Image (tube, rainbow, N blue to C red):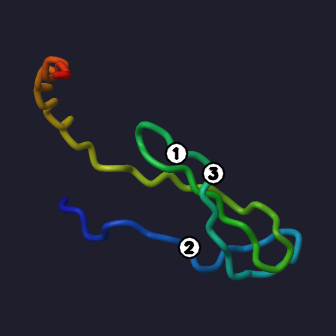
């Protein structure tokens, strides 16, 4: 089965403290080698309502360009 949807972000989640569905704010918690960890916070009371991990596409490492040798020091003529 092919993928129909890319990625979802929550706009509202149920908050047990407020006892109703509330709009949420997304906060970046950690930047990991495999992606980013985000936390959903209730906009009413600030309670954490969940987390999601956003995968970062892997990119091949950039090739290292060879360094040129430093030029020889100049001699001052007097």
Residue 31: which disc?
Answer: 1
Answer yes or no: do the residues labelled 2 and 1 have beta carbons within 8 Å?
no
Nearest the camera: 74 or 38?
74
Mark positioned earlier in the residue sequence (2 or 1): 2
Q: Residue at x 68, y 82 (%)?
A: 23
Residue 48 on image: x %, y %: 76, 60
Q: How far apart are labels 2 and 1 at the CA level?
A: 20 Å
Q: Depth check: give the residue in front, 58 or 64.
A: 64
Q: Residue furthest front?
A: 78
Q: Callout 1: helix, strand or loop?
A: strand
Q: CA distance from mark 2 to mark 3?
A: 16 Å
Q: CA distance from mark 3 to mark 1?
A: 7 Å
The circle drawn on residue 10 is: 2
Q: Give the number of the disc on residue 23.
A: none
Q: Which mark is residue 29?
A: 3
Secondary structure of residue under mark 3: strand
Packing grade of label 3 (10 A; few <14, some 14-19, many >=20) is: few
| Quarter placement of the C terminus | top left
Closest to the camera, between mark 2 and mark 1, is 1
């Amino acid at each position: 089965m092919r993928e129909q949807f890319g990625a979802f972000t929550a706009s509202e989640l149920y908050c047990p403290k407020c006892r109703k569905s509330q709009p949420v704010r997304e906060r970046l918690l950690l930047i990991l080698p495999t992606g980013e960890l985000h936390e959903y916070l209730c906009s009413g009371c600030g309670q954490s309502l969940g987390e999601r991990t956003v995968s970062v596409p892997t990119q091949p490492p950039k090739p290292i360009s060879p360094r040129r040798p430093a030029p020889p020091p100049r001699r001052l003529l007097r």
